[in-house]
Image (tube, grey):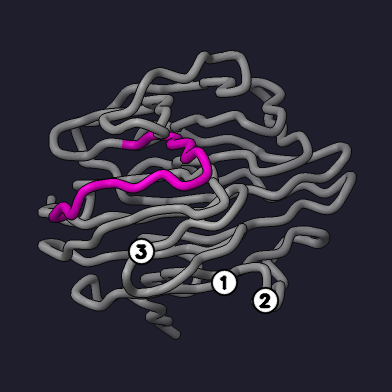
Amino acid sequence: RAIQINMDLSRRIVINTARAAWVRSPAKGVWRKPLEREAAESGQVTSIVRYDSGSEFVPHGHPAGEEIFVISGVFEDEYGVYPAGSYFRNPPGSSHTPRSSEGCVLWVKLNMFPADDAQSLNINTRSHAWSAGLVEGLAVKPLHSFGAENTALVQWQPGSKFVNHVHHGGEEIFVLEGVFEDEYGSYPKGSWIRSPPHSQHSPFSHEGCTILVKTGHMIK
């Protein structure tokens, strides 16, 4: 039966994934915390996924692509080994058999690529230097851009503030370390924030943080 979870992109959603329960997947030893889901085991998906040590998922395809950031541990498939801090994209039409020998936790998005975004990416972000951000106290590691869509890691030094700005194509944030903030709330490590197209805010961080950010991807 079809399952709809947080698929109304006009709504602002905040989930503290550290407090959310793990849900069993069809594969033994693989667990998920669903953030948005179009259907039971198909369609668009965003989730936090945990592989217990020695677990494996069944071979599967990505009709409209797969995007992964390795939060902790080491993720694997037949094409490579991806330690914590790895960011990779498997294009539409790709397939693999994922597994983890030691266990891992992932941020995963499925079936959201534009049909003509066919680039494969495998970036070990830990080996890339930070670049200066748009304001003092911010540093950036760009990860991917296609059309209006941009994905990056952003590091905020304690006390950093950013100007009020509009997300014309929406914004999605996952807090990797520290506490991210804006005028609507405070978001500790593990928080997922999805802000709809044309929303705006004035973000800051008193104690500092590192966030994974996507913008522009909610308008195709």
Q: Assign a secondary structure to mark 1.
A: strand
* Number of other residues with Cα within 10 Å of mark 1, as a class: few under 14, some 14 to 19, many 20 or more: some
Identify the mark at residue 19; answer none if there is no mark. Answer: 2
* Lower sequence index among marks 2 and 3: 2
* Number of other residues with Cα within 10 Å of mark 2, as a class: few under 14, some 14 to 19, many 20 or more: few
User: Which circle, 3 or 1, is nearer the viewer?
Assistant: 3
Q: Mark 2 and mark 3: span between their CA atoms?
A: 21 Å
Residue 212 placed where, x, y %? 46, 44
Q: Quadrant of residue 5?
A: bottom left
Verify CB contact (< 8 Å) between mark 1 and mark 2: yes
Q: Residue at x 34, y 48 (%)?
A: 161
Q: Residue at x 45, y 32 (%)?
A: 90
Q: Residue at x 33, y 28 (%)?
A: 133
Residue 63 visible from this viewpoint? no
Nearer-the-camera pick, 182 or 53 = 182
Q: Amino acid at mark 3?
A: Asp
Identify the mark at residue 16; answer none if there is no mark. Answer: 1
